[in-house]
Amino acid sequence: MRQEPSNHRSRAAARSCAAVLTLALGIGCQSLKSVTPAKTDIFAPEVAPAWPGKHTQRVSQYVFFADFDLKKEDPLFKELSELRETVVRELQLPPSNVVIQVYLFEDREKYEKFMRARYPDLPKRRAFFVAQPKSVGASDELLVFTFWGDRVRQDLRHELTHAILHSSLKDVPLWLDEGLAEFYELPPDSDGVNIKHLEELRRGPFTPDLARLEQLTQVQQMSPAEYREAWAWTHLMLRGSPTGRQALLAYLQQLRTTPNPGPLNVKLAPGMAQPAEALQTHLRQLSKAAASAQ
């Protein structure tokens, strides 16, 4: 899930501020822009912990910094490397050489203490993605913060999806940013099927409306239902509709050069006469497949 202050989502405005933030919830992550990190020198040392960095490890596009010993043989690191290759390949994005810095804390207590000191106005969440402007004309610093807990796999997959997208694109519309992160946070063998989202959507009532979803620019406007719908549209386009996939990939190519290419639903309509009906059919098919697999 994402959350933003009430001011804006524009890239230009973000560059005049200190950070663009996304943070993980149980169903996804949140995003905040225009949040200024606290100056750590106003805190006593015990209140402002040092950045993790005792142990480092380079994996693909990521550099991991941790305050505990990283097990290089942990299969999670190989999976996260493969995640980057999958996202780039499936979405036909150019591989980026922008380093994604991942800061891992040994436990939640250390992580939360750091985040309270660094970003005292933010709510408690399991993980954050930060696209932090360095200077005018320079690439943003892409940072991920989290701790080594039971859901670290899901959290890292979700946040790193955001980071991979933002390393290649000028910007990502709110619904699509979250829809793709919800899709790729799942284990590779799930093929992007979020059973919990699927069950809630099929329980209804559910009236899909992509045009309405695309008008949402602040996360305060989105309830959990909107996150589920964002996932559903994304899954339809990537797995359930060749014309939807073509429209989505073309849209992502536009996002490489412009932060605001307009709504996707307009580009989707010519090849998909009844998008809402197509989505409902897709969800029914997913439900049947899930039921037969049990």
Image: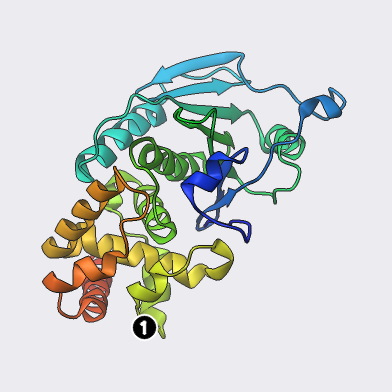
Q: Position of residue 127 (x, y in %)?
A: 57, 42
Question: To which residue does mark 1 refer?
Answer: 207
Q: Is residue 150 visible?
A: no
Q: How is the image coloured?
A: rainbow
Seen in the picture, residue 168 relative to 34 is either above or below; the reply is above
Nearer the observer, 26 or 84: 84
Quadrant in which the C terminus is drawn: bottom left
Inspect the image, locate mark 1, and give the three-letter code of the amino acid beneath it: Thr
Q: Position of residue 90 (x, y in %)?
A: 21, 44
Seen in the picture, residue 258 relative to 37 is either above or below; the reply is below
* Number of marks present in the image shown: 1
Which residue is located at x 23 percent, y 47 percent? 253
Q: Position of residue 119 (x, y in %)?
A: 71, 40
Which residue is located at x 39 percent, y 51 percent? 172
Which residue is located at x 23 percent, y 73 percent? 288
- SS at mark 1 in the image: loop
Mark 1: give few (<14), some (14-19) or many (20+) Cα within 10 Å: few
Which residue is located at x 33 percent, y 66 percent? 232
**Residue 10 shown left or right of residue 91 in the figure:** right
Nearer the observer, 161 or 14: 14
Q: Position of residue 206 (x, y in %)?
A: 39, 82
Seen in the picture, residue 51 relative to 169 is either above or below; the reply is above
Nearer the observer, 255 or 239: 255
Q: Is residue 177 visible?
A: yes
**Residue 209 shown left or right of residue 12 in the figure:** left
Q: Quadrant of residue 229 in the image?
A: bottom left
Looking at this view, name the residue that lies furthest to the right. 44
